[in-house]
Image (spheres, rainbow, N blue to C red):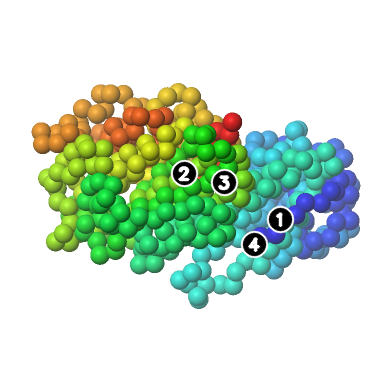
Amino acid sequence: MDFRSQVASIDALASHGADALLLVIGGDALPAGLDKTVAALIKDAIKLGDFELKAGQALTLVRPAGLKAARLVVAASGKSLKAARSAVASALGQVKGRGVVNASIAFAGFDDGLTESLIEQTVLAADEAVYLYRFTKPSAPAAPKLSKLTLLVGKDDAKAVKAGLTRGQAIAAGIELARECANRPPNVATPTFLADQTKALVRSHGIKVEVLDQKGIEKLGMGSFLSVAKGSDEPPRFIVARYEGAPKTQAPVVLVGKGITFDSGGISLKPGAGMDEMKFDMGGAASVLGTLRAVAELKPKINLVVLIAACENMPSGRAVKPGDVVTSMSGQTIEILNTDAEGRLILCDALTYAERFKPAVVVDVATLTGACVIALGGVRSGMYASDDALAESLSAAGEAALDPCWRLPLDDEYAEGLKSNFADVANVAGREGGSITAAKFLQRFASKYRWGHLDIAGTAWKGGGAKGGTGRPVGLLTHFVLSQVR
């Protein structure tokens, strides 16, 4: 979508021409200084009972008298950033599919004026509103017609608007890349596909990329990763991508993504119902790839390394079995009690590989456990951190991005269930605290640096009629990376 800004006063909205004029009002009263014609139209709608200045309410007027715009859409909002984004989404929903090509949006009644965050969330809401998956659906309806959104802003807001537009468009591009990767069917979105998508950033954004094939992975001694890949005919890929925005002497931020492009459960086969959604099990890989794109577009003075371990988890005569013991890159042996707990088996080797960068911090991202979905649903991602400062940084980034997470504990007692009679560690414990015990498993391989873990099993995609990747947590991760700039 083409986003633009234009200096305009809220007392002269009637003279602004567009297919649709969207007005978002913060609070439960009409703001002082609002265009008299617009105010009169809203007051009349309130008097008739067609509209209330309550958060969640929206009103559309066609060919409103005295306005140059063909439509006036009014959306009521609370004062919070979350409420404002919801109101923007509601306003955009009023014009979606109605032939609106060129829309303009104005804000009134927000005490702090137009902030960077409000503009960023407006861009993200608009991009989400027009997103339509089409790659394998040529019979889909025509692409949404809304292609231009002009933000009407005051002179004093110009700096904040420019910054918000820049950040919002970069994150939106990252989210769209993550969604597209996640939404492709698993016969298309293979480990090789993820590698190709990463290589494309070399040409478009100057990213440095190295892709290791099975022989390269074997040379690294990633026995745990390779054990998962054994059952599939699709070759695994280990992807290393680097954005270098700071001197080489500056320790990088490292993001690690779980890239299981299809998860059948392996020999510990999943139930058939809903198994198609296991194409989304590469949501962690998709999100770190989207974050890489967003960061590369914003060009902050920081070094960022993205690691993606990508393979399928399939049952076959070659597949790893419950009871097998494998040796990880770290030298630790792992007894595999359940082959459907495969994400941690590929991540542990990637976490060991991360040591070579002498990182400032490492955050892994994975659709790791159903237990996290039970604990937090689809609202917040599960978050673990090796220290309080890192936990606070991740939490703050999530709140700023409206992509929230929630910290869960890492008490040593949770690791008791991972003890094994036949290896250094088992890959699963009991059902209780399943997301926590999975995190405790990963923590064993991340002891040499500051480490965070995001379990996005509940937030990376939606099911049902809205089935599809969400692009989360690209927003959280991008804000986190930016917060680490020195």
**Up/down of 354 relative to 5, above or below:** above
CB-based contact (under 8 Å), mark 3 and mark 2: no
Judge from the rendering whether residue 371 lies leftward or rightward of residue 96; answer left or right: left
CB-based contact (under 8 Å), mark 1 and mark 2: no
User: Foreground: 326 or 141?
Assistant: 326
Q: CA distance from mark 1 to mark 4?
A: 17 Å
Mark closest to the chain's N terminus, 3 or 2: 3
Identify the image quadrant of residue 483: top right
**Amino acid at circle 2:** Val
Residue at x-position 28% and y-position 57%: 214
Q: CA distance from mark 3 to mark 4?
A: 30 Å
Mark closest to the chain's N terminus, 3 or 1: 1
Q: CA distance from mark 3 to mark 1?
A: 19 Å
User: Of tags 1 and 2, which is closer to the observer?
Assistant: 2
Judge from the rendering whether residue 118 lies leftward or rightward of residue 37; answer left or right: left
**Up/down of 274 relative to 52, above or below:** below
Residue at which label 3 appears: 295
Q: Quadrant of the C terminus?
A: top right
Can you tell which mark lies on residue 305?
2
Residue at which label 1 appears: 3
User: Of tags 3 and 4, which is closer to the observer?
Assistant: 3
**Quick one: which residue is furthest to the left in this view?**
421
CB-based contact (under 8 Å), mark 3 and mark 4: no
Residue at which label 4 appears: 96
Mark 2: few, some, or many residues within 10 Å (few <14, many ≥20)? many
Can you tell which mark lies on residue 137?
none
Q: CA distance from mark 1 to mark 2?
A: 30 Å
- Residue 22 appears at what percent x and percent y? 74, 53
